Amino acid sequence: MEADSPAGPGAPEPLAEGAAGEFTSLLRRIKGKLFTWNILKTIALGQMLSLCICGTAITSQYLAERYKVNTPMLQSFINYCLLFLIYTVMLAFRSGSDNLLVILKRKWWKYILLGLADVEANYVIVRAYQYTTLTSVQLLDCFGIPVLMALSWFILHARYRVIHFIAVAVCLLGVGTMVGADILAGREDNSGSDVLIGDILVLLGASLYAISNVCEEYIVKKLSRQEFLGMVGLFGTIISGIQLLIVEYKDIASIPWDWKIALLFVAFALCMFCLYSFMPLVIKVTSATSVNLGILTADLYSLFVGLFLFGYKFSGLYILSFTVIMVGFILYCSTPTRTAEPAESSVPPVTSIGIDNLGLKLEENLQETHSAVL
């Protein structure tokens, strides 16, 4: 009789305890995977970039709505001038292969193309708002993410896992939720004069942003942050200056300058300068793709500020959208990609373990080494 007692009524308790233990262990593994210091740091850095973008959007909208000032090229020109004064001058005083003249002799035409892509990406997206709706811009701007992933696959040899595609889908679902909230709040009614032209401009701008971001990741990880910013500052200043004189000289002449308008221009320039200066730092420890997923929340920050400045209507879907985007961003950052570098590549050996989310991969390796020692 005593031998039969384990099969009696008390037997399911150990099984239940075992299931509860496995579930608790699973939760701990998920927590250890998704909420590491590296991921939390990546989230914080990504949201800092989003706040910079929010600052540029709010100042531009305030200039346009309150003072009727629409000069996107002038605003970009000021930013490129700041980059030139800081980073290009820094390259000029360097010695050896990092000197400005040496870089120009070897790669001047490449940086002209990069500067052209960066300048025109900023310009055509702003111009698109004059032709199409806010909803179209928000939706079609996401076209840059698959373009960026494709370019990373062929140029940076990034190899994605299933979790990365799921994460991107979740982020795009969050964007769709945000657009739905805009429709319910009536923010999509400001349609422009020609929606088709506007949509084409958005797709072109998103593609140019993707090209610029992939080039930025390549230069930052294989060369240096200062070289990227210095060259963009140099050629961005030249290209935007020429374009400024061609397309916006009448608009600039009609600006009713006062201290408030000047302050808004300064605020825009500082936000844009911080965005350009900090983005290479974030890309270096993650990737251009993860950065672009993280800054999808910028529109939401702009909306929250717009509730007070422009009288936007609030919807609970905005909170849901922010949550969904952040979940997708965390999922993407939770797993590093691997890099299929060609045999003749001169990339340092450490990048062969995964150029995307490199900091996370190094953290995982340290944890595995520590466990092996124990």
Image (cartoon, helix red, strand yellow):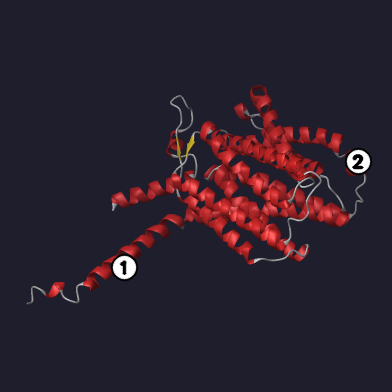
Considering depth in this image, is 287 or 137 the residue closer to the camera? 137
For mark 2, what is the residue? Answer: 250
Residue at 74% across, 41% down: 196
Residue at 65% across, 32% down: 94
Question: At label 1, which amino acid type do we have?
Answer: Ala
Quick check: 167 above or below 149? below
Marking on residue 20: 1
Q: Tell me whether circle 2 and circle 1 mark residues in contact (CB < 8 Å).
A: no
Q: Kindly tell me whether residue 283 is visible in this rendering.
A: yes
Query: In terms of secondary structure, where does tag 1 sit?
Result: helix
Residue farthest toward the top in the current orientation of the protein: 105
Q: Position of residue 241 (x, y in %)?
A: 81, 35
Residue at 62% across, 63% down: 317
Marking on residue 239: none
Considering depth in this image, is 69 or 9 the residue closer to the camera? 9
Quarter holding the N terminus?
bottom left
Residue 107: which quarter of the image? top right
Frontmost of labels 2 and 1 is 1
Q: Residues within 10 Å of mark 2 (few under 14, many from 20)?
A: few
Q: Residues within 10 Å of mark 1 (few under 14, many from 20)?
A: few
Position of 334 with respect to 222 (left or right) is: left
CA distance for labels 2 and 1: 71 Å
Q: Position of residue 286 (x, y in %)?
A: 53, 45
Position of 262 with respect to 303 (left or right) is: right
Q: Position of residue 310 (x, y in %)?
A: 78, 62
Query: In terms of secondary structure, where does tag 2 sit?
Result: helix
The mark total stands at 2
Position of 251 with respect to 89 (left or right) is: right
Considering depth in this image, is 29 or 311 the residue closer to the camera? 311
Residue at 58% across, 45% down: 281
Question: At label 2, which amino acid type do we have?
Answer: Lys
Residue 44: which quarter of the image? bottom right
